[in-house]
Image: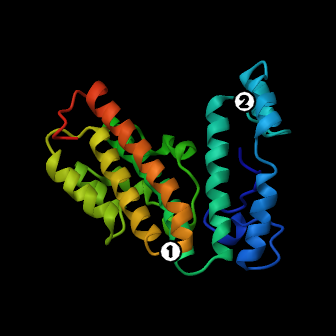
Amino acid sequence: MRVRINITDPGDTAAVAPTWRTAKDIDYLTACLHGRKGRMAEAERLDSLCRMGSIRDLFHGVFPGSEVEGALDFQRLLVHELAAELSGFRVYISGPGVNLIDWTLVRFQMENLKVLIRAFLTKVLIGELDEYLVPLPRELTLDARGLAEVEFPEGFVRLFPKDGLLRENMEKALEIYHDNPRPFFFEAALDRSYFQGLVLRMEKLPQEDREIITPMVHQEIDIFHLMLIARGRFHYGLAPSML
């Protein structure tokens, strides 16, 4: 469960940093994270949340005093605040560590890309998507309006940074699946790009940090592979060679 962090301007990194920040160093961040862990839903508090009588009670148990009315609002708030929290971490870190944190924010950019791609393929108006896009720092904000001018799937590439794994893998996917442009293939290409980038940045960390982080990254990749195979095989009927 996430701590409430107010966002005054999604494009302003300073605005999404915790308001109680007084120092820019890793020791201070460590202390804040230690305190934050004490506010997570574990043990008795988690049991209490699980025993709540309704979904609405759960919403307000996690975000007391909030105006959350439904599951979509609840999910959106969790995601938005997670992105804001990760953005705030960056002011405390330098070197390979900040590169890894920066890349975790690319995950939200990637999810925004998925929303835009689905909208294009299903002919949904771009103006109806704002509530589904995650607010991000300016350097990760996509030109959503530019998608309205795209006439063919190849136009997706314009939304990507000119150099990098996201564009490279999307170009490959467009070449392979040009005659069968289903969201599944493009979303899988984006996920693959993200995890490739995550591994590359993880490998540049000091050995002590890698020993802690590597098992978590590998577990996340294994979960992705399991879901990819399950969806591809049983929902789309794809052959193992294509997967």
Tell me which residue sits at (31%, 72%) in the image.
163
Is 225 in front, or is 52? Answer: 225
Q: How far apart are marks 2 and 1 (CA)?
A: 42 Å
Say the numbered circle drawn on residue 52: none
In the rendered image, which residue does mark 2 sit on? 69
How many marks can you see?
Answer: 2
Q: In the rendered image, is residue 141 in sight?
A: no
Tell me which residue sits at (79%, 40%) in the image.
63
Element class at badge 1 = loop
Position of residue 21 relative to residue 241, above or below, is: below
Contact flag, marks 2 and 1 (Cβ < 8 Å): no
Q: x and y percent of residue 125 in the render?
A: 42, 40
Q: x and y percent of residue 122 in the render?
A: 34, 35
Furthest toward the top, the residue is 53
Is 214 in front, or is 150? Answer: 214
Residue 31 vs residue 231: left or right?
right
In the rendered image, which residue does mark 1 sit on? 205
Q: The residue under label 1 is which amino acid type? A: Leu
Give the position of the N terminus as an image quadrant.
Answer: top right
Tell me which residue sits at (62%, 38%) in the image.
75
Q: x and y percent of residue 183 in the render?
A: 31, 40
